[in-house]
Image: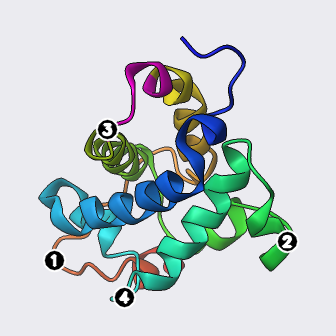
């Protein structure tokens, strides 16, 4: 077992990039994540890079995201979207599957379980998930409330 190693030290920068890329690949693939996938632009290239930059600092490495983009506020960029428990859980499903796919150790998954839940729950801005009947335009649905 690693002693006092940060997740950044365990994974390293390249594996964190792989995690971010795999996270969005999973979101793109899983039918159970379709709802949150529809909240993102068609191309995931930019958001993959931003997630990698964010995770680098959040996991104990250099504050790359903050250096490039300034403040690290998760609630403001997510505010336009209806994010309730179901959306949070879809995000967690993708993150956990990404950890599996990159071969993260049980030790690392254990280290991240609670902090990743808190991270996902921090952007939740509704107590209940919204379900549109057939219109998946989440921005229109969220601005109407």
**Helix, strand or loop status at disc 4:** loop
Camera-nearest residue between 5 and 36: 5
Tag of residue 43:
4
Alpha carbon distance from label 3 to label 1: 37 Å
**How is the rendered protein coloured?**
rainbow
The residue sitting at 33% across, 48% down in the picture is 98
- x and y percentages locating residue 82 in the rendered image: 47, 64
What is the residue that sits farthest to the bottom in this orientation?
Answer: 42
Tag of residue 103:
3
Alpha carbon distance from label 2 to label 4: 24 Å
Asked if the residue under mark 3 is in contact with the one under mark 2, i.e. CB atoms within 8 Å, the reply is no
Q: Which residue is mark 2?
A: 67
Q: Earlier in the sequence, mark 2 or mark 4?
A: 4
In magenta, the rendered stretch is: 103-109
Instruction: Classify residue 50 by image quadrant.
Output: bottom right
The residue sitting at 53% across, 51% down in the picture is 126
**Helix, strand or loop status at disc 2:** helix
Camera-nearest residue between 76 and 26: 26
Name the mark nearer the viewer: 2 or 1: 2
Alpha carbon distance from label 4 to label 1: 23 Å
Q: Earlier in the sequence, mark 2 or mark 3?
A: 2
Name the mark nearer the viewer: 3 or 4: 3
Instruction: Classify residue 68 by image quadrant.
Output: bottom right
Few, some or many C-alpha atoms within 10 Å of disc 1 (few <14, some 14-19, many ≥20)?
Answer: few
């Amino acid at each position: 077992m690693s002693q006092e190693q940060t997740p950044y030290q365990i994974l390293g920068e390249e594996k964190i990039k792989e995690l971010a890329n795999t996270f969005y690949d999973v979101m793109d693939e899983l039918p159970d994540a379709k709802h949150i996938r529809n909240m993102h632009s068609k191309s995931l290239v930019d958001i993959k890079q931003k997630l990698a930059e964010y995770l680098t600092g959040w996991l104990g490495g250099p504050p790359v995201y903050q250096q490039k983009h300034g403040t690290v506020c998760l609630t403001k960029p997510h505010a336009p979207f209806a994010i309730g428990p179901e959306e949070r859980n879809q995000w967690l499903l993708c993150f956990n599957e990404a950890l599996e796919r990159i071969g993260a150790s049980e030790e690392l998954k254990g280290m991240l379980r609670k902090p990743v839940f808190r991270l996902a729950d921090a952007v939740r801005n509704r107590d209940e998930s919204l379900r549109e009947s057939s219109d998946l335009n989440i921005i229109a649905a969220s601005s109407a409330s």
